[in-house]
Image: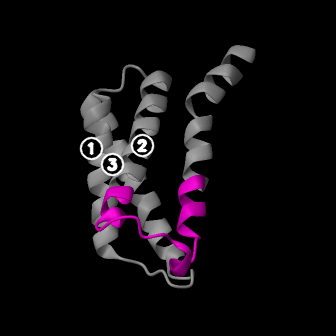
Amino acid sequence: MAARIKKFIKYWLPVIIYAPLIFYLSSIPGKDVPQLFIGQDILFHIIEYAILALLINRALKNYNPKLIYARRFLWVFFVSVIYAASDEYHQMFVPGRCASGFDLCIDGIGSLIGSLLYR
């Protein structure tokens, strides 16, 4: 039992911690988001979801090593995009933020990049 708990902590806990971090960052009102450079929103979305995809890939691969890459790739993409959609919905209720289909697409691209990097 202790080995299972250690394995869970090592592989799934980072995903469980990182997902609420994305939610927290999306909760920052629009006026409080510092503008560091042009296009930062796009870059941050890509990085954010590439990291999420890396973490989910890592967890799935270690929990189910026989899962073929293509199937894992699809699962990671599906889970990441569903999470991104829920995050975009959440932003509709944050002052100065809005839900954006463009951001959702960028999140999906970040997820694809993360999955490709993990391979």
Query: Picture quarter containing residue 94?
Result: bottom right
Provide the major secondary structure of the magenta segment.
helix
Q: Measure the alpha-carbon separation of dots 3 and 1.
A: 5 Å
Which residue sits at x=55%, y=41%?
15
Q: Measure the alpha-carbon separation of dots 1 and 2.
A: 9 Å
Instruction: In the rendered view, tell whether residue 40 sits above or below residue 97.
Output: above
Whether residues under marks 3 and 1 lie with C-beta atoms below 8 angstroms apart, the answer is yes
Query: Is tag 1's residue or tag 2's residue first in the polypeptide sequence?
Result: 2
Which residue is at the far front? 36
Residue 11: tell me if it is visible. Answer: yes
Q: Which residues are magenta?
A: 21-45
Q: Which mark is residue 113?
A: 1
Q: Is residue 99 magenta?
A: no
Secondary structure found at label 1:
helix
Which residue sits at x=32%, y=41%?
114
Query: Picture quarter containing residue 28?
Result: bottom right
Secondary structure found at label 2:
helix
Pointer 2 local density, CA inside 10 Å: few below 14, some 14–19, many at least 20:
many
Identify residue type, mark 3: Ser
Q: Which mark is residue 51?
A: 2
Whether residues under marks 2 and 3 lie with C-beta atoms below 8 angstroms apart, the answer is no
Q: Could you say where residue 68 lies in the image, as x and y percent from the top left? A: 29, 26
- Mark 3 lies on residue: 111
Instruction: In the rendered view, tell whether residue 102 sits above or below residue 77.
Output: below
Pointer 1 local density, CA inside 10 Å: few below 14, some 14–19, many at least 20:
some
